[in-house]
Image (cartoon, grey):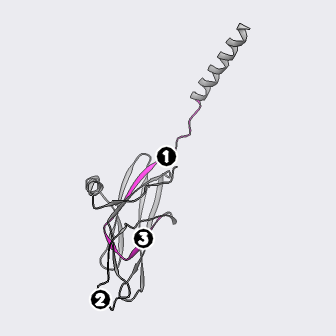
Amino acid sequence: MKHSSFFKASLVMLVSVISLLMPQKISAQSTVYFFMRKIWNTELDVYQNSKPIFNMVGPVTKSKQIKSAMVLPIETQAPCKRKAVFSATGKTIFSIDATYTNPVNAKTAKYAAEIQLNLTDGATYYVFITRKGFNDFKMELLSDKEAEKMLKDKKFVALDDYDEVN
């Protein structure tokens, strides 16, 4: 009887040691923060390698019908930021599709921009989505110092985190 309990304890210990020694599945993760200043009457979607991942529009802070000739009110959308965690590493293209609706005549205009990042495990990137002139958008990489200011800025509304890993 005593021999049997020793055998069971040894077996349990052996299984425990083997499970600890087996290579664990480790997933690579990269973090990308997206920032955008306030915009007006615009819907903006973010894509990763042409796959839609989330909408990047802050809440409407002001809606104003300026002239009676305007078909739609001017809707001011708050500046926003979003944290996104990705499992992919290597070359990744992030792009945006923006649709602006003109409040005077309700006509829409489409804009696009993209940025290529070489994601590495454990790295953090900061991408700023901003206007490029009057009729276009651009995406640019921010320095850590610039991003730190924007992360602390209370004007930027934090949108829900995007987590591709979980």
**Number of the label disc, if any, that sits on residue 67:** 2
How many tags in the picture?
3
Residue occupying the point 39% across, 75% down: 42
* Tag 1 residue: 28
For mark 3, give the secondary structure: strand
Please provide the residue range marked out in magenta.
Answer: 21-47
Mark 2 or mark 3, which has the lower sequence index? 3
**Number of the label disc, if any, that sits on residue 44:** 3
In this rendering, which labeled residue sits more in front, label 2 or label 3? Answer: 2
For mark 2, give the secondary structure: loop
Crowding near the residue tagged with mark 1, few <14, some 14–19, many ≥20 C-alpha atoms within 10 Å: some
Mark 1 or mark 2, which has the lower sequence index? 1
Pinpoint residue 45: horizontal percent, then vertical percent.
45, 68
Mark 2 and mark 3 in contact? Answer it, CB < 8 Å.
no
- Residue lying at the far top of the rendered structure: 2
Crowding near the residue tagged with mark 2, few <14, some 14–19, many ≥20 C-alpha atoms within 10 Å: few
In this rendering, which labeled residue sits more in front, label 1 or label 3? Answer: 3
> In terms of depth relative to the viewer, which is nearer, 40 or 31?
40
Tell me the quadrant of the picture where the N terminus can be found.
top right
Pinpoint residue 123: horizontal percent, then vertical percent.
39, 48
Amino acid on which disc 3 is placed: Leu
Can residue 59 be found in the magenta stretch? no
Amino acid on which disc 1 is placed: Ala
Is 142 placed left or right of 118 in the picture?
left
